[in-house]
Amino acid sequence: MFNLFLAVFPEIFIINATFILLIHGVVFSTSKKYDYPPLASNVGWLGLLSVLITLLLLAAGAPLLTIAHLFWNNLFRRDNFTYFCQIFLLLSTAGTISMCFDFFDQERFDAFEFIVLILLSTCGMLFMISAYDLIAMYLAIELQSLCFYVIAASKRKSEFSTEAGLKYLILGAFSSGILLFGCSMIYGSTGATHFDQLAKILTGYEITGARSSGIFMGILFIAVGFLFKITAVPFHMWAPDIYEGSPTPVTAFLSIAPKISIFANILRVFIYGSYGATLQQIFFFCSIASMILGALAAMAQTKVKRLLAYSSIGHVGYICIGFSCGTIEGIQSLLIGIFIYALMTMDAFAIVLALRQTRVKYIADLGALAKTNPILAITFSITMFSYAGIPPLAGFCSKFYLFFAALGCGAYFLALVGVVTSVIGCFYYIRLVKRMFFDTPRTWILYEPMDRNKSLLLAMTSFFITLFLLYPSPLFSVTHQMALSLYL
Amino acid sequence: MNTDITALEKPQYPVVDRNPPFTKVVGNFSVLDYLRFSTITGVSVTVGYLSGIKPGIKGPSMVTGGLIGLMGGFMYAYQNSAGRLMGFFPNEGEVASYQKRGWFPK
C-alpha cells in the first residue's frame, strides 16, 4: 500500500519542503537572537533547491511513477503527458525563482512568504496537470490561484501591487466560480465528474435539444473559466493591469507557469473528455480575437511590461490555434508553442528585471541600451525577433507548426489571420529593436551589470532560442509522445 | 482508494517483488543508493549554509537545508530501490541475490 505513494513522491516532497521552509521562515525571521534577519534570499535558495530535488524525483523515477497510474480513487492520472508537463513546469519554476534573487536585494524585499507561496502554487499546478476528475481539477486550480492572488499583492508599499492583487482576486474568483458552475452543470446532466466517464458519455454525443442544454452550458462555462485564466480574448481585460502592477518576478511567473498547467488541464478536459464542434467554435473565435487584439493593442503601448502582457495575449491566441484543430498535429504544435513561448518569456522577463535596476519602465528608456550594454541589447533583439516569428529563431518554428497544423485540418482562415497578425506584431517588436539601436535617448541611463543567476538563465534561454532550429527533433518527439498519450 | 498496483508501463526487468514492503525496500538499499542519499543531503546542507551567510543564520539554515536534503535523498534512494525490486530499473544484483535464496524470475 505504501508503494502507491511512489506515484506522488514529487508532490509529497515539495509539499513537505514548503512546510519546512515556512516553519524556518516564521521561526527565524521573528528571532531576536538573530536580529530579525530578512530571509527572502535564504528561503529563495532553499526553495530553488527543493524545486530541483522535486525535478530529480520526477525525472529519475519516470517508469515507477506510473505504478498507480490512476491513484486516489481515480482522481489523478500519471502518463507521458503528465510526466513531461510536470518536468517543464518545474524547470519554468526553477528559472523564475533564479530571476528573483537580485530583485530581493534591489527592492529590499524581505517577505520570505513569497517563495513559500510560489512553491505551494507549483504544487497546485503539479496536481492540476495530473487531475483526472472535475473536483480534483478545481481544487488544484484553487490551490494555485489563491497563492497567486497573494503574491500579486506582495509588494505592500506599492498601490499598483495592491490594486493588481485585488483585481486578480476578484476576476480570478469570478472565473473560478464560472468554472465550478460549469462543472456542476456537467455533473447535474451526466452524473459524472471523472474524465473517463465523461468521455464515454460525451463521445459522439450531439449537443442539440433541450435535454442537452445542461451539458452545452456546462462545457461553455468550463471553457469560459479556462479562457479567463489563460487571458484569452474577450476575457483578457485583467491581464495588462495585473501584469503591470505586480512585482516583475510575479509577472514573469504569472505569464509562464499557469499557462502550462491550465493548457494541460484544457487538453485533458476537452480533448479527452468532451471535444466537439461547440468547443472548437469557441476556441476558434477566441484564438482569432486574441491574435488580432494582441497585435493591435500592443502597438499603442509605451510601457515594456504592458507590451509584454499584450504580446502574451497574442501568443495565447496562436497557441489556441493548436487546440482549435483538434488533431494530434494540432496538440503537438500547441505543446511546442507553449514550450517555446515559456522560454522566450523567461528570457524577456529576465532582461526586463535586469533593466529594472536602472528604473527602466518605458520603451523610450531603452534608447541607450545598444551603446552602453550591447550584449544585452543583442539578446533582447533576438528575443523580440523570436516573438515576432522571424526565422531561423525558435518563435518562427512554433508559429510555423501551429499554422501548418491549422492548414492540415482545413482551418485556412485561422492560419491566414495568424500570418497577418504576426506581420502586424513585427511592428512593435522591431520598434523595440529600433529604439535600442538607432534612437538617441532623451536621458542617458547607466546600466548596471546583471547578477550571475540572470546571466546564466539568459545564456541558456538565448542559446535555445537561437539554435533550436538546428536540432528540433527531441522536442518534436517528446511533444508527439505527449499528444499520443492524450488520445490513447 | 485504488490499491491496485498496475503500472502503465510494464516492468522491463525481472520482477523480484511486485509490491515490496517498506522494510524490504529500505533493506535493499545499495551502496549507490546510500551515495545518492548522502550526496543530496550534503549538497542541501551546503546550499543551506551558503545561503545563510548573508542574513547571519548559517547554522539554522544549514539544518533546514539538511532536513530538506535528508527527506529528498531518502525519497530518491527509496524510489531507486523500490524500482529495482519491482523490475523498473536494472536489477542484476537483486536478481542474483534472490536467486541464491531459491527465487527465480517469472
Image (cartoon, rainbow, N blue to C red):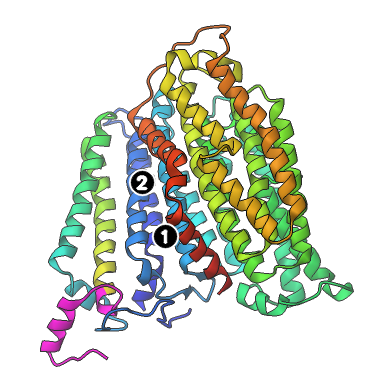
**Bounds of the magenta segment:** B84-106
Q: Residue at x 72, y 40 (%)?
A: A420
Locate residue A59, reporting x and y percent.
Answer: 36, 60
Q: Quadrant of the N terminus of chain A?
A: bottom left
Q: Quadrant of the C terminus of chain A?
A: bottom right
Q: Is residue A79 visible?
A: yes
Locate residue A452, reporting x and y percent.
Answer: 33, 30
Question: Label 2 marks which chain's residue?
Answer: A
A141 left or right of A215?
left
Nearer mark to the viewer, of 1 and 2? 1
Residue A486 drawn above or below residue A417: below
B4 left or right of B16?
right
Mark number for residue A146?
none
Q: Secondary structure at mark 2?
A: helix
Mark 1 or mark 2: which comes first in sequence? 1
- Please give the residue where the numbered disc 1 appears in the rendered image: A11
Q: Residue at x 54, y 69 (%)?
A: A484
Locate residue A178, reporting x and y percent.
Answer: 73, 56
Residue A245 drawn above or below residue A418: above
- Please give the residue where the numbered disc 2 appears in the rendered image: A21
A186 left or right of B40?
right
